[in-house]
Amino acid sequence: MPKLNKSNLRRQIIHKISSLSEKEKKAIEEKLYRQLFQSFLWKEANVIGMTSSTSIEWDTGPIIEKAWQEEKTVALPKTVPERKQLEFYRVDSFDELSDGYANILEPERNAGKFVHKNEIDLLIVPGIVFDCKGYRIGFGGGYYDRFLTDFSNRTVSIASKLQFVESIPHENHDIPIQYLIREDGLFQVCEV
Ligand SMILES: Nc1ncnc2c1ncn2[C@@H]1O[C@H](COP(=O)(O)OP(=O)(O)O)[C@@H](O)[C@H]1O
Ligand SMILES: [Mg+2]
């Protein structure tokens, strides 16, 4: 049954986000960016892993630009659907991205720009639904659960209050996120 619950929750929250007006969406994004940029997580990170957002997610474009302005390294994933894996590459300009898996903008494979997971200081993990323990519902591919099995640095997700539910049904393979950025602040996930 957990599968069914996950997909229902995912659908409900996608519906909520898509019902926001452009203005409401922008206002939430501004608050989320402010919280992220003033957090110690951001300040202490030199290499930041994140994704290029799709239309129902919070726009990560301004986050990528801010990182470049501050001379941080931006690593974005190339999806390898055959193995359901993510490979991160350093990206220095939006021109380096093109449509990849599920129409997500991705870097090309380039050995010289490969970023090993140990080099990523802070990984911004995308997701649709969250709970206070850091469990998340992603897009259903399990890509980040796989990536996180041997990732040992900091993880954070950026989400609006409207994406939170009391408790997410999680399975053994689900790996919780360590920190959550919301409109109202940065939270370390609770253990209870
Ligand atoms: N570490 C893993 N090893 C093998 N399969 C995994 C792993 N993590 C996730 N999966 C597979 O990916 C599928 C999707 O994961 P799920 O947690 O439902 O999606 P998401 O996290 O994207 O919302 C799961 O049914 C599971 O079979
Ligand atoms: Mg999962």
Image (cartoon, rainbow, N blue to C red):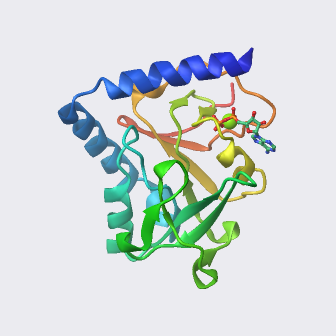
| Image-based side of 95 in relation to 27, left or right | right
Residue 49 location, x and y as percent?
A: 54, 61
**Quarter of the figure that contains the N terminus:** top right
The residue positioned 33% from the left and 66% from the top of the image is: 65
Q: Nearer the viewer, residue 96 or 39?
A: 96
Residue 129 location, x and y as percent?
A: 53, 29
Count of numbered circles in the view: 0
The residue positioned 60% from the left and 85% from the top of the image is: 112
- Extreme residue toward the bottom, this view: 112
Task: Establish if 21 lies above or below 27.
Answer: above
Residue 29 location, x and y as percent?
A: 30, 42
| Image-based side of 119 in relation to 69, left or right | right
**Quarter of the figure that contains the C terminus:** top right
- Extreme residue toward the right, this view: 172
Q: Quadrant of ligand 2?
A: top right
Task: Establish if 44 lies above or below 17.
Answer: below
The residue positioned 68% from the left and 71% from the top of the image is: 116
Visible residue check, residue 163: yes
The residue positioned 39% from the left and 67% from the top of the image is: 67
- Extreme residue toward the left, this view: 23
Visible residue check, residue 38: no
| Image-based side of 28 in relation to 145, left or right | left
Which quadrant of the structure image shows residue 138?
top right
Q: Nearer the viewer, residue 177 or 79?
A: 79
Task: Establish if 24 lies above or below 42.
Answer: above
